[in-house]
Image: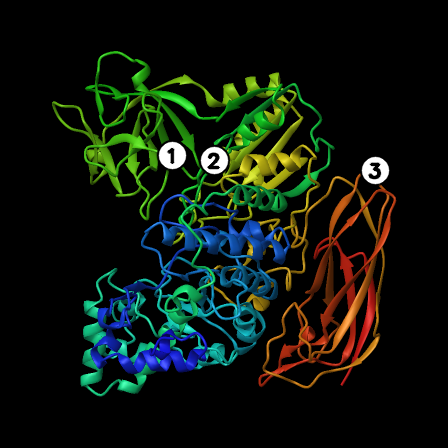
Amino acid sequence: MTDDAFRRTDLPLAERSRDLLDRLSAEERVAMLHQAMPAVERLGLRSFHTGCEALHGLAWVGVATVFPQPVGLAATWDPELVTRVGDLVATEVRAKRASGADVDLNVWAPVVNTLRHPAWGRNEEGYSEDPHYTGQLGAAYSRGLRGDHPRVWKTVPSLKHFLAYSNETDRSATSSEMSPRTLHEEELPAFRPAIEQKVAGSMMLAYNRVNGVPAHTQPELVAEARSWSDESIAVVSDAGAPSFLVSIQRAQPDKVHGAAALVRSGMDSFTDDGPDPTPSLEAVRGALAQGLLTEEDVDAAVLRLLEMRLRTGEFDGEDDPYAAIGADEIDTPAARELAREATARQVVLLRNDDGILPLSEPASVAVIGPLADVVLTDWYSGTPPYAVGIAQGVRDRYPTATVEVVTGADTVALRAPSGFVAASADGALVDAVADARADASLFDVTDWGDGILTLRSRASGLLLTGGAWPMRADAERVGGWVVQESFRRHLHEDGSWSLLHLGSGRWVRVVRDVGLLVAEGVTLDDAARFEVETVTSGSDEVARAAAAADVVLVAVGNDPHLSGRETVDRAHLLLPAAATDLWQTAHAANPRAVLTIVSSFPYVLADAADAATVVWSSHAGQELGHGLLDVLSGDREPTGRLAQSWPAHPAQAGDLFDYDTRRQQATYRHQPAPYAFAFGHGLGYGDLVYEAIEVDAVLIAAPAPTRRHPALDPRGDERVVTAAVTVANRSARAVEELVQVYALAPELPIAASRRLLLGYARVRVEPGETRTVKIRFAVERLAVWDGEALRVQSGHYRVAAGPSADVLTVDSRLTVTG
């Protein structure tokens, strides 16, 4: 057995970490405070860095399985499935590390910020507008990432982003005004379960300010989160946030004072200046020299970081139970199967008024729209090993059917005074010198809404990009921290176009004499003017293909890098006119059309609001086409249910920058008017009737006030009520129902939520079958913040059940005595 206590697996974690800390010099301890921790060769410590992106699959380090976005995973309403996804992701993190990739085992996921407003640019990263369901799924994903070994964690999850963060506009400057009631009822409950259940070992702080104070320097809030567990929680900064404390928020006079404030507030690791630790460590040394920090402050932070590393088995040698995971455990058959299952389970049938779904055996299918046969990935997606788009899914499911893909893009030729714009076959050259229009001069122009265009060269098959000088047509997809493949068209009075490159804010111009295209014009006067010849009308092609098909799938939605993403909130909630125009054209040509929305967020359907058949999926990754067709074909019953309401009109969502959802009557908890598609909504192919609900305790005493936030899963010491909900299937198909139970509060001294999710259960009900489903909930879930604690008020509550928050068809009474 080794003499190094920190390598002994028979010793407690605290003893091992203290031994390792004691072996580090004062300078080595300071060096551990940056994301890029150096090797300490004399102790056999290799270099380590915090943060591996794995939001819905391992990202940024090559090929890995890509699962549905978290907002899609939430639509499964299946924590066990989410845990299985997390477990497989953790395996692939370990496998990628075994391959020699620069990957460490602190995973920056899950995101447990609530989806209180659908305009948030990072909507896809969260789970739900309900904080308790968010907390439940955050714990479920973390449980999978952590693994089930009692000592060694497969990975160490970091919960993001603490606290009150869900706007991108000026995110490092804005202050989320947070009343104590909102804090305790709607923010902290999303973070608590994963920490309390000891499946998250880290937490990332948020960019924003909270009540005027940077979230990175709120020691009381960090201490609150750490109080939920007797195990240590390593706290990391978000990227660049330590510098923003000085430069943007101006909360500290310089980096030295900033470093002191951060460490004293409970932050352990600086994610700043990329891989260069020098500025951060110099600031810490300066704080020590000026007496703003003590060595004990540094030791406390380093100790938590060392405990995080010890949990991963880094120093356990052959005693690491996950050490045998090899590089070949990426993209396994089991991973592909799970990706397809997760994709199918999150598809939501929003409307099926004409009974078009499930599809019969069509002889011909037109798949129409910009998302007809592509799989788009977001900023936190990995590189999928393969990609099955919707049209390919149709081909695979109906191999004898004729499948036609029409994107709806106009095919155009652009002519400058110097000649036609043309691209080389590899896209490396784009110029405007051709005397005549040729195939190399053709570009497919896709309108993503609000005037945002992409142009795909017919010659190279790739996108025009302003990311190179001169411009090229060699981009495989829209992507990057700053998107280089999007443009906005300025239409002149004579019908000619000028193109604004959105990534640089510069106009496209043509270089004199050589005709190369460059994105460098400062004003519209600098821009080239292109005569436009429409060679093929996308609208005409949509009408033709739709009219000729047995059934039409109109695939529209968003590109995850455009019109809403990290750093950019959505400008509005409407389904863009470009999408509704496609829908109306296709539907007019063939009423057997399915509006198939693939998106990162809810829409107000606007001019498509009367669509009779509507299906939604998140950007679900590599198995999008297969999973979607599993549902559309009826091979799988639709099981997806919305975890986020779809507003009937934009005003229903409230103000993006107002975090008081109660004051705004925002989210299902407070909104008095019905939504277009409510929280919990989703249809099956059969019809289910809710017959009755009974609670096993019609009279119950209120529990004592507490500061412990309740969770969806009742704890062992809480007062539990069981609701028995009876449902009957009177149709000819089985129904996979999500039975939901809500509390409807009476008038109380402290007004409670209009409705509150208490619990849910999945049940399969066969044709002609009646089943009773039992759903347990803690009475503590009825608590409201009274200024000092969470208190359950006495009164007569209605406990109601139904298929969504807006459709609660049976109820019973529960009287709470005080």
Q: CA distance from mark 2 to mark 3?
A: 35 Å
Whether residue 266 is visible, yes or no, is: no
Q: Residues within 10 Å of mark 3 (few under 14, many from 20)?
A: few
135 vs 283, left or right, is right
> SS of the residue at dot 3?
loop
Query: Which residue carries the number 1 mark?
Result: 453
> SS of the residue at dot 2?
loop
Q: Determine contact: label 2, label 3, CB under 8 Å.
A: no
| Earlier residue among tags 2 and 3 | 2
Q: Amino acid at mark 1?
A: Leu
The disc label shown at residue 732, or none: 3
183 vs 684, left or right, is left
Front in this rendered view, residue 666 or 812: 812
> SS of the residue at dot 1?
strand
Q: CA distance from mark 1 to mark 3?
A: 46 Å
| Earlier residue among tags 1 and 3 | 1
Quarter of the image for residue 427 reads top left
Up-down relation of residue 663 to residue 728 (above or below): below
Front in this rendered view, residue 491 or 112: 112
Up-down relation of residue 483 to residue 550 (above or below): below
The disc label shown at residue 387, or none: 2
Quarter of the image for residue 766 reads top right
Quarter of the image for residue 536 reads top left
Q: At 50% from the left edge and 66% from the top edge, which residue is drawn?
A: 659
> x, y (%) of residue 811?
82, 63
